[in-house]
Image: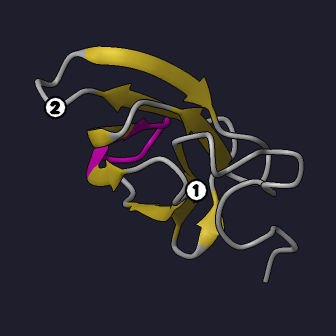
Amino acid sequence: MCGATKGGPSLDGVDVDKETVIQGIVTLDGEPVGNAYVRLLDATGEFTAEVPTSATGQFRFFAAPGEWTLRTLAPRVTPTDRTVQAQRGVPVDVEVAVSAA
């Protein structure tokens, strides 16, 4: 078992009452996937942002409230989409489980 923190990065120092946070961890067979990319697509499918995962598979976006799609891309895995509903003051903490291609 790895030593990664479950879920997204720590929210210490983030005023979650004033932010809309979408964060989480990308895993493959229960283990974190570092150096993957997570794209943030709006409700129409338009690209909004992209971040790399940390060595422990974690990512975070600050977004507007609403429906978003997380598209996860990494070498040798099947691209994975996950729809989330984000609202200000309630962080979305999601695990995106990818499968080997």
In the image, 43 versus 4, the foreground residue is 43
| Disc 1 residue type (three-letter) | Gly
Marker disc for residue 24: 1
Q: How many marks are shown on the rendered structure?
A: 2
Residue located farthest toward the left when viewing the structure as drawn: 44
The amino acid marked with disc number 2 is: Ala
**Label 2's element?**
loop
Which of 51/3 is in front? 51
Q: In this view, does 18 lie to the left or right of 77?
A: right
Q: In this view, does 30 lie above or below 72?
A: below
Q: Is 43 covered by the magenta stretch? A: no
Residue placed under numbered mark 2 in the picture: 43
Q: Observer-nearest residue: 96 or 60?
A: 60
Residue displayed at 55% across by 57% down = 91
- Asked which secondary structure carries label 1, the reply is strand
x 48%, y 47%: residue: 88
Label 1 crowding class (10 Å Cα cut-off): few <14, some 14-19, many 20+? Answer: many
Is residue 81 one of those drawn in magenta? Answer: yes
For the magenta stretch, what is the residue range? Answer: 72-82
Image check: 45 left or right of 74? left
